[in-house]
Image (cartoon, coloured by chain):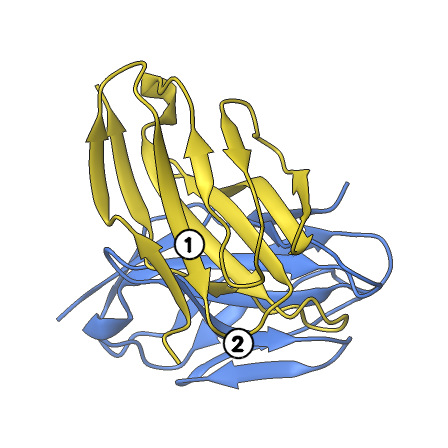
Amino acid sequence: GDSVTQMEGPVTLSEEAFLTINCTYTATGYPSLFWYVQYPGEGLQLLLKATKADDKGSNKGFEATYRKETTSFHLEKGSVQVSDSAVYFCALTGNTGFQKLVFGTGTRLLVSP
Amino acid sequence: NAGVTQTPKFRILKIGQSMTLQCTQDMNHNYMYWYRQDPGMGLKLIYYSVGAGITDKGEVPNGYNVSRSTTEDFPLRLELAAPSQTSVYFCASSSGLAGGNEQFFGPGTRLTVL
């Protein structure tokens, strides 16, 4: 079945450092790909998404490019802030009819001043 | 729009007790979901619904029941609570449209079974 693999955390960075969180997937067909963020004590929020190969999703300085050739959707940010400390989930869903979201296990990011 | 709302926010149950977690959405979404999130883990799908009167099991349905009598509401019932059901429960909804099925999440219910 479909699956998502994320790098294990926690990822610990200093403020203004460059961030990469790796995500690879296994799926049939052409899934849509998502990054969700969960701040402490809150539910998940959609951060960005991409629905077809070579699409780049971006939001709040975060970016991720849908790479079909490497089945990857790595999350990047050029300069992280303390307020970016959260858990980040990579997810996918199929593109034909109704499809459930398949989540990775999440990567915790800790940013220190 | 309030989005997806869940009640209660916190609850402590004794083993064998039962309770209902409430979930309501005001986005007229057809699709609704219940997930559980165990400490340090990702989300696991418990049940989902593709419309009023239609529900189906997810990955971990044992010990839970759901109903969907209206588009807006999707309550999750726990019967005979067990310590293994200690978790954070999230309700979500989506339009279900193909090509980017974004789900909107509620704030969660933190349940402890002692």
Residue found at the very far left of the displayed protein: A113
Residue in the image at 52% along x and 66% along y: A35
Give yes or no for contact between labels 2 and 1 (Cβ–Cβ under 8 Å): no
Where does the image place residue B92, in percent across and percent down from the top left? Answer: 49, 58
| Quarter location, residue A49 | bottom right
Residue in the image at 32% along x and 59% along y: B107
Query: What kind of element bears circle 2?
Result: strand
Residue in the image at 38% along x and 35% along y: B38
Label ID, residue A44: none
The residue that label 1 is drawn on is B23
**Pointer 1 indicates a residue of which chain?**
B
Query: What kind of element bears circle 1?
Result: strand
The amino acid at mark 2 is: Leu
Label 2 crowd bin: few (<14), some (14–19), many (20+), radius 10 Å = many
- Seen in the image, is B19 located left or right of residue B24? left
| Quarter location, residue A19 | bottom left
Rendered yellow, the chain in question is B
Rendered blue, the chain in question is A
Residue in the image at 38% along x and 17% along y: B80
Name the residue nearer the viewer: B37 or A10.
B37
- Seen in the image, is A98 located left or right of residue A35? right
**Pointer 2 indicates a residue of which chain?**
A
The residue that label 2 is drawn on is A48
Q: Is residue A98 visible?
A: yes
A100 lies above or below A49: above
- Seen in the image, is B105 located left or right of residue B101? left
Name the residue nearer the viewer: A91 or B84.
B84
Where does the image place residue B50, in percent across and percent down from the top left? Answer: 69, 55
The amino acid at mark 1 is: Cys
